[in-house]
Amino acid sequence: MNSAISAPISATLYSDPACPFGYSENPALRVIEWRYGQQIDWRLVLVGLSEDTSRYEAHGYTPLRQAHGNIRFRDQWGMPFGLVVKPRLAASTRACRAVIAARREQPGSEWAVFRALQLANFNTPTLLDDDDHLRQVLSGVDGVDAERLVALIDSPEVREEYERDKAETRTAAGSPTEFQGKAGNSDGQVRYTAPSVVFQRRGDGFKLEAGGMQTVEAYDVLIANLDPTLDRKSPPENVAELLAYFESGLTTAEVAALLVPNNGLPDMPGAEFKLLEAVADGRAERHPLGGDAVWTVPGGQRPPRLESEREQQAA
């Protein structure tokens, strides 16, 4: 996400790397990021969905059930989902604290770390509570020290900041998010679900909420009401322009959303045609992931993979 301290609007995204809804919302979030750029100052707050897996087990979740769910998310919203039946369930707390460690060590890097964990969690055998897995995923993120971040997961400072994020997330009682039935309550406190976005106008502090999954148009109308003087960028002329802007790459669903004019419907096949043309012209690279791909400029950052997955593919 782009960030600018002097931006006229701030936005707080409540999310968690283990949430398939938060992951599936990425196409809509990329559109808002493209349209408004540094006019919106983004802040990421980690929800902390699970400290352990007992709640999931009590509700009958299994690795197979999660894989089945991935099919539905993939088909409904289009982000890549690898149909990996993991060896066990995993909690998200350690991954959330790795993101916070990145935020503390190098402000701004938390976004790249968060995205890498999302892509890995939903497309590879990655277990978000396995430090070796976290280390492997983060080692592929440009500009961060994976060993350092994993070493900081249990530090008092990171733990305290994580608890502050969790406490902030659990302040949705009486909010528009709760009114719309989009709040959660998994531990006795009404919380913002992943993803929820709270937009705030800097001049007077006025806030508008978009709780839970929302359409691009829902975000856009809130921003328009907060500040109709902003510059609003149109869809790009070509996909290479998008890939140059989003340095960590884009999925096909994200590109399709970014190419759509107002109130249009994403055209996934059309986006793939244009992306493949860019590959043929040497303006893009395709990196397979979860039955789909991440597309980058030539030499761009590759999506995360585990050693075990690479070995399986080689075999």
Image (cartoon, grey):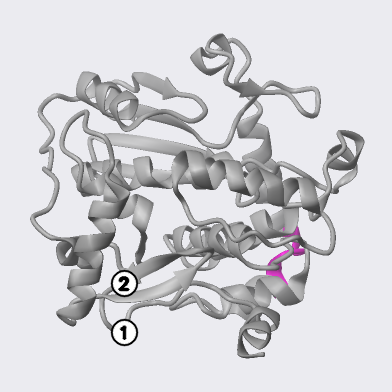
> In the image, residue 160 lies at what x, y percent?
71, 50
Q: Which mark is on residue 299?
A: 1
* Vertical comparison of 211 with 247: above or below: above
Circle 2: is it few (<14), some (14-19), or many (20+) Cα within 10 Å?
A: many
Point 44% across, 47% down: residue: 78
Task: Say which residue label 2 marks.
Answer: 296
Q: Is residue 178 above or below residue 248?
A: above
- Residue visible at 59% across and 65% down? 120
- Within 10 Å of disc 1 (Cα), the crowding (few <14, some 14-19, many 20+) is few
283 part of magenta stretch: no
Q: Is 26 left or right of 50, judged from the image as shown?
A: left
Label 2 sits on a secondary structure element that is: strand
The residue depicted at 60 percent of the width and 31 percent of the height is: 193
Q: Which residues are magenta?
A: 151-156
At a point 48% along the width and 30% down the height, the residue shown is: 213
Q: Is residue 274 visible?
A: yes
Magenta-colored stretch includes residue 154 = yes
The quarter holding residue 231 reads top left
Residue 72 in the image: x percent, y percent? Answer: 59, 41
x and y, in percent, of residue 225 in the image: 22, 18
